Amino acid sequence: MSDGHDRRSFFRELFRGAQRAAGELASFRDSLADHGEQAWGPGLAGYSETTQRPVPALPVWRLASAEDLRDICRQVDREGWADAAAALARPSIRLTPDVDGLSWLGGSPRVPAYFEWPTWDGLELVFLGQLRLADLPSTALPDTGSLLLFFALDRTPRGLKAADDGACRVLHVTEEPVEELLRGHALPEMAVSASVELTLPDDPEPLIELDGWALDEWAGLRERLAAAQGAELEERATEYHALHRLLGYPDTYAGGMELDAQLVANGIDLDDEPYTHPRIDELSPGAAGWRLLLQLSSDDELGVELDYLERLFVWIRDEDLRAGRFDRVRAFVR
């Protein structure tokens, strides 16, 4: 195994350890709140005055092609990466504020008469948005109906435990809406429109094995790809953007969520040293079958305020996405 791979594995495990610590801190904070103590909070709570504020993300102005990506590989003297990069590239839909948008985040869902509000652990979930599929660019998603997103935002489970299953619900409603369901804890409604960009993962293994220096070159390639579409690469931006997206690759330093989704979906808690679990070798290959469904960022306009400007990442198996099944998603806050 290469030194570059070893370094990536080390830092990935270090980051996951930090995530577990953050989850424990969140649990401690929640226990303080349960006992009436003041504590900074996630979800619907506020930032401190010294915390960096989210900046609204902008739509991309063009979708890069596979040939554009190959040209960029040549520009950085990495033409040998072109085929693998093209194989890894995935389109992603940015959801950005637009008063004329026909989908929306926050607000209230428009649903059929039979609709039942989803709950978790005895509490109603918070409605996060409704995406009208017919108005989105053509993707692997169904082309009719709407996707409705709900999450336990007032408790913000981090997704590290198998018991967090159901804290995030994605519902595909195919019937025409006949009523608007109102709840007192509704977020501000923000209409959004869609623009498509080509995205690459932060780590291109197994198609390209990179050492530490080449990983930096890969990030530079991704930065050029983003710029060619009128966007910034989030990990190299000076500001945190309220960047919401469907499909593609996540904007995060917390790599390896595909494996985490695979483990948690199979009943393994991530705060119990999961990578030494006796089933790790059996389950790990299934990580390749998971992909990002939706990313929701901390956003002042939307009233979503996650700790340390984190994001909600919702993952789905490829086979479930192709079949239009959205009842087995896994969600992480990172």
Image (cartoon, grey):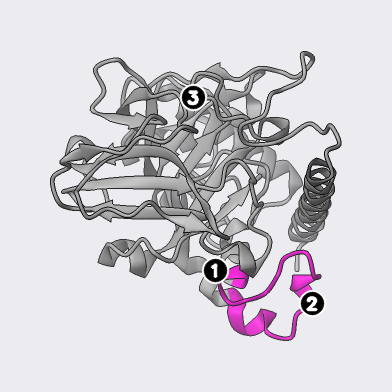
Q: Provide the residue designation for mark 2.
A: 276
Q: Provide the residue designation for mark 1.
A: 287
**SS for callout 1:** helix
Decide which of 45, 231 is in the foreground and name it. Answer: 45
- Residue 325: give x, y in percent of width and height: 32, 65
Q: Provide the residue designation for mark 3.
A: 302
Decide which of 83, 278 is in the foreground and name it. Answer: 278
Magenta residues (range): 263-284
Residue at 27% across, 62% down: 324
- Residue 270: give x, y in percent of width and height: 72, 65
Q: Residues within 10 Å of mark 3 (few under 14, many from 20)?
A: some
* CB-based contact (under 8 Å), mark 1 and mark 3: no
- Count of marks overlaid on the render: 3
Q: Amino acid at mark 2?
A: Thr
4 with respect to 77 (left or right): right
The disc label shown at residue 317, or none: none
Residue at 75% across, 54% down: 12
* CB-based contact (under 8 Å), mark 2 and mark 3: no
